Image: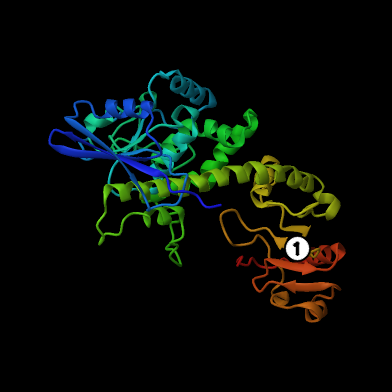
């Protein structure tokens, strides 16, 4: 179905001899006008015009954005470090809900080149019912920022009680929890304080145990990388072997106007909105994937772990009743049962009916705890059967991290023989 490009409304306001402007999609509502008048107190004159935009075909660009200029640093305020308790988060969210409903709430971030952290922070805020229709101001003007309900990534102030979430001030060193070393960005700050409610909005669950589990998992698997990238923290202490330009921050950065092209304020709005949509869509997909796919897999992995000694007397081989995302669950379950590093091989049947034996790699590494024997690697079918002495073999990957057999007895025999030979680790590739 073809979507009709939305009308982009633009308004120009002159203040203290400076031209300010905002652009937003759809028909401006009275509430938006009120909010914008709050933002531009003392405007000398206003011009409102409507124009049809051909810059985008997305009917989802429904997020107002205000563009401005100027910046003066403000003195920051410290907040306690460490994992935010669910009680404190609930208290802060009740404070947010208590704000007056008479005037639409507003969000602000800095103008100019945008980055993944504030783009995602703005999107996450708009997932909350209290900010669902909030205009987004892009400015560095401290007088304008003072009129905004929630300010992210600008203003040199971190004060969650006043909804100020900047991380650029020298005094700021907050992390997601005491166990984390990655300094928070504006995305991490918004998520730290409203993450549980965001997960509730995306998944619909009110189960406190699930919310708490996903709260830390979403940070570990999605938000922390954005915090690290924005703060210039490398993911590893070693020199990377290759350049990865496909990350979410890289893709958001490429949506900025090229340095050697002229940019109108209307185009800047469209690009910022596109970046918000891209980052936010991936965030929502990640949360839903954890809730709908990853979380149900835990029961499957836990059952396999509990019956590991029924599979093999060593307890180092587990059998999944069906394939599922198992790795992170296995690490967690091992830790919970004081059996870290115990499992070396996982057996399961793939989607086409072949049995697989897969080596368990070390957490956060491609190196396996124990690989399939070197002399098996890269062989297939009859040649592999001859070398292993096991019938039904179909293949072993050249790196030794996975192999296949036509039967369950066959993959169990492969895993058992690999255990007996104590094969050296191999890299997963």
- In this rendering, the count of numbered labels is 1
Q: Residue at x 44, y 40 (%)?
A: 123
Q: Which x, y percent locates residue 174?
A: 39, 36
Observer-nearest residue: 360 or 140?
A: 140
Q: Is residue 340 visible?
A: yes
On screen, residue 218 versus residue 5, left or right, reads: right
Q: Nearer the viewer, residue 199 or 371?
A: 199
Which SS class for mark 1?
strand
Q: Quick check: can you spot residue 74?
A: no
Locate the C terminus and report the quarter of the image it occupies. Answer: bottom right
Residue 215 vs 378, above or below: the answer is above
Residue at point 49% right, 26% down? 89
Residue 388: where, in percent of width, then height? Answer: 80, 75
Q: Position of residue 370 (x, y in %)?
A: 68, 62
State whether residue 181 is above or below residue 242.
above
- Could you say which quadrant of the image residue 378 lies in? bottom right
- In this view, the residue in front, 298 or 99, is 99
Specify whether 345 is left or right of 100. right
Quarter of image, res 352: bottom right
Question: What residue is shown with label 1?
Answer: 357
Instruction: Identify the coloring.
Output: rainbow
As drawn, is 145 to the left or to the right of 237? Answer: left
Q: For the view shown, which residue lies furthest in the left direction?
A: 17
> x, y percentage for residue 261?
26, 60
- The quarter of the picture where residue 344 lies is bottom right
**CA neighbours of label 1 inside 10 A, class few (<14), some (14 to 19), many (20+):** many
Please indicate whether residue 375 sits to the left or right of residue 77 in the image. right
């Amino acid at each position: 179905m073809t979507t009709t490009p939305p009308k982009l409304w633009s308004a120009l306001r002159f203040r203290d001899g400076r031209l300010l402007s905002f652009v937003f999609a759809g028909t401006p509502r009275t509430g938006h006008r009120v909010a914008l008048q709050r933002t531009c107190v003392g405007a000398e004159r206003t011009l409102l015009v409507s124009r049809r935009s051909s810059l985008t075909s997305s009917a989802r660009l429904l997020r107002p954005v205000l563009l401005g200029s100027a910046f003066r640093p403000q003195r920051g305020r410290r907040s306690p470090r460490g994992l935010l308790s669910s009680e404190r988060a609930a208290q802060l969210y009740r404070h947010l809900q208590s704000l007056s409903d008479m005037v639409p709430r507003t969000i602000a971030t800095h103008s100019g080149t945008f980055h993944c952290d504030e783009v995602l922070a703005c999107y996450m805020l708009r997932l909350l019912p209290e900010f669902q229709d909030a205009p987004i101001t892009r400015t560095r003007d401290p007088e304008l920022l003072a009129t905004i309900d929630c300010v992210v990534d600008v203003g040199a102030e971190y004060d969650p009680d006043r909804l100020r979430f900047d991380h650029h001030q020298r005094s700021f060193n907050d992390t997601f929890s005491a166990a984390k070393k990655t300094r928070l960005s504006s995305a991490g700050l918004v998520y730290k304080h409203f993450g549980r409610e965001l997960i509730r909005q995306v998944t619909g669950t009110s189960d406190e145990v699930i919310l708490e589990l996903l709260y830390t998992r979403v940070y570990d698997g999605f938000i922390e990388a954005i915090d690290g990238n924005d703060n210039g923290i490398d993911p590893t202490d070693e020199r990377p072997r290759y350049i990865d330009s496909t990350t979410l921050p890289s893709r958001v950065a490429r949506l900025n106007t090229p340095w050697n092209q002229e940019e109108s304020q209307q185009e800047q709005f469209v690009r910022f909105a596109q970046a918000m949509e891209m980052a936010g869509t991936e965030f929502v997909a990640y949360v839903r994937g954890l809730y709908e796919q990853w979380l149900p897999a835990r029961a499957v992995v836990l059952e396999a772990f509990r019956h590991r000694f029924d599979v093999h007397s060593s307890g180092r081989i587990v059998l999944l009743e069906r394939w599922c995302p198992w790795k992170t669950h296995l690490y967690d379950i091992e830790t919970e049962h004081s059996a870290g590093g115990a499992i070396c091989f996982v057996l399961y049947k793939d989607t086409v009916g072949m049995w697989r034996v897969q080596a368990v790699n070390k957490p956060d590494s491609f190196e396996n705890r124990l690989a399939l024997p070197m002399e098996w690697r890269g062989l297939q079918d009859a040649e592999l059967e001859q070398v292993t002495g096991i019938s039904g073999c179909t293949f072993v990957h050249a790196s030794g991290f996975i192999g296949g057999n036509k039967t369950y007895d066959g993959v169990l025999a492969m895993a058992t023989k690999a255990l007996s030979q104590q094969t050296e680790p191999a890299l997963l590739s």
